[in-house]
Image (spheres, grey):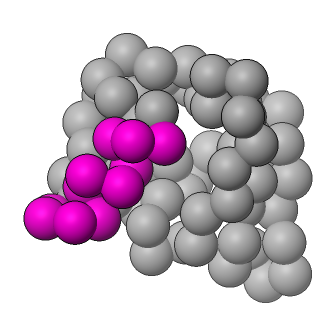
């Protein structure tokens, strides 16, 4: 299993599964992290803790703990 947190800057990946629970899962779904969605990794912050993604035309920043819950291919 490859997580979104493991993707490199410049890659475009697809969401396979959202493994978050409860309100976090709802938040990620509202941000566009649905199965099959394309995500482009734009840049990583200091110590790779915060990463900026292009999800359906919007720039979204997620913490490493959140992006580890998204399975990609």
Q: Main secondary structure of the magenta part?
A: helix
At x 48% / y 42%, what residue is drawn?
Answer: 31
- Residue 1 visible in rendering: no
Q: Position of residue 42 (x, y in %)?
A: 84, 42
At x 46% / y 33%, what residue is drawn?
Answer: 32
Q: Position of residue 2 (x, y in %)?
A: 40, 44
For residue 29: magenta? yes
At x 44% / y 67%, what residue is drawn?
Answer: 66
Q: Is residue 21 above or below residue 31?
A: below
Q: Residue furthest left?
A: 22
Stretch in magenta = 21-31
Q: Is residue 48 above or below residue 59?
A: below
Q: Split into 4 quadrants, where in the image is the N terminus?
A: top left
Q: Position of residue 6 (x, y in %)?
A: 56, 53
Residue 67 horizontal side relative to residue 22, left or right: right
At x 15% / y 64%, what residue is drawn?
Answer: 21
Q: Position of residue 43 (x, y in %)?
A: 86, 53
């Amino acid at each position: 299993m490859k997580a979104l947190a493991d993707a490199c800057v410049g890659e475009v990946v697809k969401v396979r599964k959202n493994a978050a629970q409860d309100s976090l899962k709802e938040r990620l779904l509202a941000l566009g992290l649905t199965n099959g969605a394309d995500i482009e990794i734009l840049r990583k912050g200091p110590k790779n803790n915060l990463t900026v993604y292009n999800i359906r035309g919007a720039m979204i920043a997620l913490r490493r703990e959140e992006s580890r819950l998204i399975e990609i291919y």
